[in-house]
Image (cartoon, coloured by chain):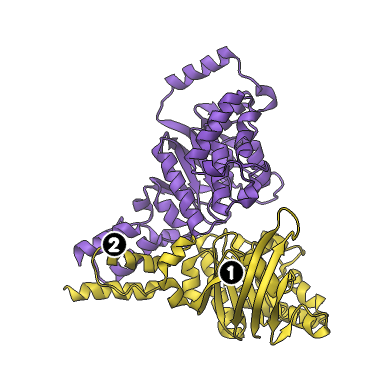
Amino acid sequence: MRIEVKDLCHVYSPGLPYETVALDGISFCCEPGEFVGLIGRTGSGKSTLLQHINGLLKPSSGTVLADGVDINEKSEEARALRRRIGLVFQYPEYQLFEESVIKDVCFGPKNQGLSEEDCKARAEKALRLVGLDPDEKGQASPFTLSGGEKRRAAIAGVLAMEPEVLILDEPTAGLDPKGRRDILMMIENVRKTQNITILLVSHSMDDVAALAERVLVIEKGRVLMNASTEEVFARGGELRAIGLSRPSASRLLDMLADRGLTVDRSIISKEEAEEEIMRVFKKWP
Amino acid sequence: MSEARSAQNSRCAVGLSSRVLDKSDRLCYHLVVMNSEEKYIINISELCFSYEDEESKRPAIDGVSLDIERGSFVAIVGRNGSGKSTLAKCLNALLLPSGGAVFIEGIKSTDDSRLWDIRRTVGMVFQNPDNQLVSSVVEDDVAFGPENIGVEPAEIRRRVDEALRAVNMYEHRKKGPHLLSGGQKQRVAIAGVLAMQPDCIVFDEATAMLDPSGRREIMDTISELHGQGKTIIIITHYMEEAAAAERVVVMEDGRVALDGSPAEVFMRGEELESMNLELPFAAAMAARLRKRGLPVPEGIINEEGLANWICASK
């Protein structure tokens, strides 16, 4: 599914003394199957933007188009489109409520009017996709799972609705390092196998650098940058000015360059940074 | 206990039975402290804790003994559910031990009559800044704690100004907290704790919800406070933050699994991995380079150290 956001504005409490312009003319596209990272400091408007993309908030002005159709139209078509856009909130595990994991994951498809059998098949598929064995964990109470497993079960609940666009808001916040790695691998796996459009909001520049093809930088409700991941992370000075940073690998290479070594500062991944350091050592045997 | 409740409890230090300490009590307290060993601010002895509402088999804390040195900077790490936050809440009597004991400046945490002293000594900063701010104006929020313990108005004014300056938020003192960024709100929460003049501050995942600059602001504030002699305990999932401490304690299944300097703890990559943890970026990169045959010395745990070694050895 292609998402196109056009001149989107959102004003909280219009006309009141607390009037706040949260989004101020945002325009961008996500192509089908694309993986887009969304970064920006706290309060930049990221979460407000996400809630517009699946129709939870209505724009003060501007439009959100899904495959060319305005998702806020009052038509059956627009409603069906909204359902194909899945949003995983921050700390989604707080929304787990059923007595068993499988029932919780079935909740979404059940509401879509699917038969019990189809719901179960969908739920099992979604659980496998997030790395939870439905036979082993399906009947367990969601509350007996570990922090990372709960988070994955909650994400399975969204995947079971088979969205064509998956929006993830800080999916690794508050998890231990292994939990974080598992979630990232799961996202990578979903992307490879499901061919869906993914929009990832994260404060971890390393995660965005590892996963996204393109990065959108939001600042004060506007799009500050919209370019390939490499191009965005090359603009270190501008990122720092708005409270962000380059990924760890890039920062290490910056330090080496500052100390007079000739290294490729455009590198953003650990693997390439490792090769670059090895190259430095080979040059001076 | 919810985070918001915990935050308020830890700032409303007045227990029913300890509204005011009389003079002789205070004198006695000072004598005890003077005479006791000055080296440690907190002693934890065979601490056990189980949550009552959990039918779970395993206690959240299962026999932890730790001594926290005065003025030290300690990081506590461990997987989700390893008992880190429970341990933190035992340090200022938000939770009371089911077994063993916690001593704060020599005072047992179960001593209800000394709750004031305990909470005055150990302050807590929690994960979500929005749960910790109680007023609609920044400086009122910082004054909340001292007001609650009956500090003189002039002294409150002085403490509030000093605390806001210490976290670089003085110029924002008249603003509403909702107008601040996450990092700024968290700094106001720290100022609220500082206004209680604690000797020790516990940060329970205080950077988890912040963007990179917010995290940097808080880590800078923490190292400044440490430089001023405060005892700092941070609980974190970010190994880079733990690497900035003087001592790292690794919790696993409610017990202490590793305890040492960051260099010592981060030498044990495989053990950490088995406990769902990882090495800080620089230590992980050093390990990868070692595997490729470079003689990177053990004990490199930050980017600075790694960059220096590469430049000196290439």
The label nearer to you, 2 versus 1, is 1
Evaluate whether residue B195 shows in this view: no
Q: Which residue is mark 2?
A: B307
Q: Position of residue A51 (x, y in %)?
A: 69, 69
Name above or below for residue A100 compared with residue A162: above
Residue beneath the point at 47% across and 76% down: A229
Q: Position of residue A169 (x, y in %)?
A: 62, 67
Chain B tint in image: purple
Chain coloured yellow in this rendering: A
Q: Outermost residue toward the top?
A: B24
Q: Secondary structure at mark 2?
A: helix
Per the rendering, the mark at residue A222 is: 1
Among the 4 quarters of the image, the one containing residue B8: top right
Residue beneath the point at 67% across and 51% down: B56
Q: Position of residue A126 (x, y in %)?
A: 67, 77
Q: Position of residue B25 (x, y in %)?
A: 57, 15
Among the 4 quarters of the image, the one containing residue A116: bottom right
Q: Secondary structure at mark 1?
A: strand
**To which chain does the residue with label 1 belong?**
A
Evaluate whether residue A178 shows in this view: yes
Residue type highlighted by circle 2 = Ala
Q: Is residue A136 left or right of residue B239?
A: right
Name above or below for residue B81 compared with residue A85: above
**To which chain does the residue with label 2 belong?**
B
